[in-house]
Image (cartoon, rainbow, N blue to C red):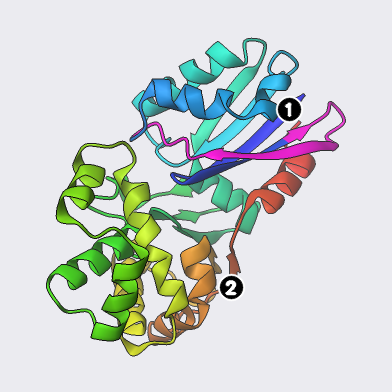
Amino acid sequence: MILIADGGSTKADWIALDINKNEVFRARTLGLNPAVVPGEELKNRIVNMFQLINIKDEVEEIHFYGAGCGTPKPVQILHDVMKEIFTNASIHIAEDMLAAVYAASGTNPSIVCILGTGSNSCYFNGSEMEMLTASLGYSIMDEASGNYFGRLLIRDYYYNKMPKQIAKSFESEFNLDADFIKMNLYRKPNPNMYLATFAKFMFEFKNEKYIKKLIRKGFQEFFKYRILPYKKDNSTPIYFIGSIAYYFKETLEKVANKHDLSVTGIIQRPIDNLLEYHKENIN
């Protein structure tokens, strides 16, 4: 049995294949970002998915692509957790950026971007990823991500910069008590995922001027720091992965056009494309 997984901070999508690479089942766990989730909690999130545990002794290979897996220490944490569960498996862990590349452009040169709970980008030259910088996560970077927009929404609400009608809906949808917010940000695991839950609110009001302005600001920052420094022209395809890009496609394309660039494709969930890549390219 082979497991392929695309793991963000919010959720992880799994596909199980038999030895002939035929799909057996799909499953979804909570996010498995080892940079922000403790090892014991990572283990709990896997073992609580009965479909995975039912086949744990049959799994021979795991190909996991995940948020927070761009540096050695968190990769080792997640590897150790998985090895404890899937004792017979060879485990291959790579960052989610590589899954985005495989899902979007395969082996073709392109700029590939992630706009999910977090954000990132790379230039793929056809064989290797070229990164502008290491990602330092939600508190410093992650422009135009779910947690970035969640942070802006909370700030605007507390500074009374949010339009009254939208603020009223915001109040009815979320617990905005200051102590509750601070507890989730500073005392509980996954503060990035917590912030990203607020970003979903934008989907309901995406045609409102206030939300459009917020989205445009985030996308402009993302282009400034995560796309323009690659110094590529319009001949280089640009792909986006994630719900933020998917639901705000029109604004994203407008920001790209202002820089004489164009969006080649947007993929909301990369797991199906990732599966096809594995079937065709990985033995």
- Residue 49 visible in this rendered orientation of the protein: yes
Decide: few, some or many residues near mark 2? Use Cα within 10 Å; few <14, some 14-19, many ≥20.
some
How many C-alpha atoms fall within 10 Å of the one at disc 1: few (<14), some, or many (≥20)? many
Q: Is residue 128 visible?
A: no
What residue would you read off at disc 1? 2
Residue 246 against residue 213 in the figure, above or below: above
What's the distance in space between the residues labelled 2 and 1, CA to CA? 31 Å
Q: Identity of the amino acid at label 1?
A: Ile
What's the residue at 51%, 39% (across, down)? Answer: 30
Task: Decide whether residue 25 is among the magenta residues.
Answer: yes
In this picture, which residue range is highlighted in magenta?
16-35
Q: Quadrant of the C terminus?
A: top right
Q: Is residue 39 above or below residue 194?
A: above
Q: Secondary structure at mark 2?
A: loop
User: Which of the 4 quarters of the picture holds residue 64?
Assistant: top right
Q: Is residue 151 left or right of residue 98?
A: left
**Coordinates of residue 93 in the picture (x, y in percent):** 53, 30
Q: Where is residue 136 shown, x and y percent of the image?
A: 27, 45
Image location of residue 257, percent across then percent down = 44, 85
Q: Residue at 48% of width from left, 76% of height from top?
A: 248
Q: Is residue 86 above or below residue 30?
A: above
| Rendering coords of residue 173 (x, y %) | 37, 66
Task: Report the amino acid beneath label 2.
Answer: Thr
258 and 209: which one is in front? 209
Q: Which residue is mark 2?
A: 264
Give the left or right position of residue 49, taking residue 199 as reference: right
Where residue 221 sits, quadrant-wise, is: bottom left
Q: Is residue 139 left or right of residue 77?
A: left
Q: Residue 62: which disc?
A: none
